[in-house]
Amino acid sequence: MRRVLTAARMRAADQAAESRFGMPSPLLMENAGRYLADAARELGTPGARYVVVCGPGNNGGDGLVAARFLHAHGLRVTLVLVGDRAKLTPESKRNLHALTPYRMEPQSLGTVGEARAGDVVVDALFGTGLTRAPAGEFAEAIQHMRRWRAAGVKVVAADIPSGLHTDTGEPFEPCVEADLTVTFGFVKQGQVLEPGATLCGELRCVDIGIPPEAVEAREGAEVFLVEESDARGAIAPRRSDTHKGSYGHVLVVAGSHGKSGAAAMSALGALRGGAGLVTVATRSEVVESVLGHTPEVMGWPLENRGPLGMADLEPLLAAADKKDVLVVGPGIPRGEETVKLLGTLLSRVEAPAVLDADALNAVATDLEVLRRAKGPLVLTPHPGEMSRLTGVPTKDLQKARVEVARDFARTHGVTLVLKGARTLVAHHDGSVYVNPTGNPGMATGGMGDVLSGLLGALLGQGLKLPEAAWTAVYAHGLSGDLMVARRGRLGLIATDVAKGLCNVWTRWNR
Ligand SMILES: NC(=O)C1=CN([C@@H]2O[C@H](COP(=O)(O)OP(=O)(O)OC[C@H]3O[C@@H](n4cnc5c(N)ncnc54)[C@H](O)[C@@H]3O)[C@@H](O)[C@H]2O)[C@H](O)CC1
Ligand SMILES: [K+]
């Protein structure tokens, strides 16, 4: 699990590295510049020109150090300085002076000429100190780097692509798009949220000598990037002396006339997620259809007709008896009484419950249901459902995903999976986990149904929250990534991702 920082915490860590641990800023900059030069050399072709574009702050200083190392390797370096030289930070001034023996006179944008395919640009214009939209010659420099990249030039960004907001991942206009971003010390929040993650290209975090102890702890406000080893490690290898009763019994409450597929996909997600047993409680008229899709599951017919209501309470309490986890919502028939039924059911059942789809839309009408629940809850809204849960317009909440998800989880004492590009898992202790897997090929119906069942399966096997949630989200997205690596993004469907989970388990040797 990699801790993800904001610009302010990064600056505080930078200062603490010097004041508390004796790591002076010039040494940090020297280390940063060396890593930057090494990364640029990886991308350069023989005879390439290295155009290092430096801004007025310490990000520019990193670039000046990188220019020196590239020159030391005998490479063709063109140095571009943007902004008023008189405003250079002391560190950058010192590194500009250090270039004097090499006669690497900084050029202006106007005289640098065009970079060509095969060349490499080092973007050291702005880093975590960017505070507003780049303008004037700074914007022009970014436009140059974007144009050069479109012409086939490789772009390596120092610390963060210039123009990208360090904390939100939102680009100012214009913003550099990098092939590789070498970030110093710690991953920044804007590098793991879209569109920032895409603008960074490959993200490489390097240790320049800032010890983790230099970052002051923020209990209840940490953001983490989930890494494959975390998800893999959360799932224990299976012992030989086990049986289907060892891996949990999942009750899926889902499906209705015309939506039996949602129940089947949730059940399939649970089965492919390793559940020992899966029972689907659904309207009688769809039981056979669900079992037809997934003969491995057991059916629990709900004899009533129409929307789920209080008349279904006793049958559902009976269905929930001796189950390890509930998954409620995919394709359920929702009506006026559904929220009352859910509130009563959840107040009486101790098992953890996953609330998805129309269970979320029902709960949105009375959030008190969440507080009254007896067992731990995990909600899995997409942005539209999150908007209904919070009353925040979708476009606004998408610009503050971390904050909106964390506030909701904390306020209602739940774990919340806010789906979308870079799905977030927010736990009620304030911690937030960013998922890096998944791809646009997964933007198709049923993916959420599969995830709800997978999450139920992991909870049923004993994983706790939030670990079960970020592991399920990671595995779900990785299944989609492995599928499209072999066969393209278009035409990927939810049952492919469910079946594709076996590729994940194989990769993880589980
Ligand atoms: N964090 C670390 O441990 C290290 C960080 N290093 C590098 O330092 C930058 C941060 O440097 P800083 O001087 O704070 O700011 P920037 O270089 O990112 O920005 C330059 C400067 O420009 C001004 N500014 C901000 N926005 C604009 C704008 N739109 N137009 C014009 N000017 C603007 C503002 O005054 C900024 O201060 C970090 O990213 C790392 O690359 C160290 O080198 C290594 C250790
Ligand atoms: K940069």
Image: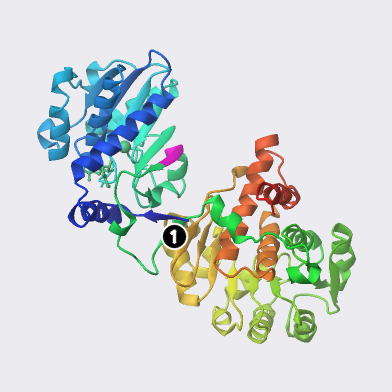
Q: Position of residue 467 (x, y in %)?
A: 56, 64
What is the span of residues highlighted in magenta in the rendered image?
A: 199-204
443 relative to 287, above or below: above
How many neighbours does mark 1 have within 10 angstroms: few (below 14), some (14-19), or many (20 or more)?
many
Q: Does the magenta stretch include residue 206?
A: no
* Residue 490 visible in the displayed image: yes
Quadrant position of residue 346: bottom right
502 relative to 282, above or below: above
Q: Where is residue 110 in the image (x, y as percent from the top left)?
A: 23, 19
Q: Which amino acid type corresponds to the residue marked 1 in the rendered image?
A: Val
Given residues 227 and 18, the one toward you in this image is 18
Q: Identify the residue shown where x is 14% and y is 20%.
A: 101
Q: Identify the residue shown where x is 69% and y is 61%.
A: 454
Q: Ligand 1 near label 1 (Cβ, under 8 Å)?
A: no
Q: Ligand 2 quadrant?
A: top left
* Residue 381 visible in the displayed image: no
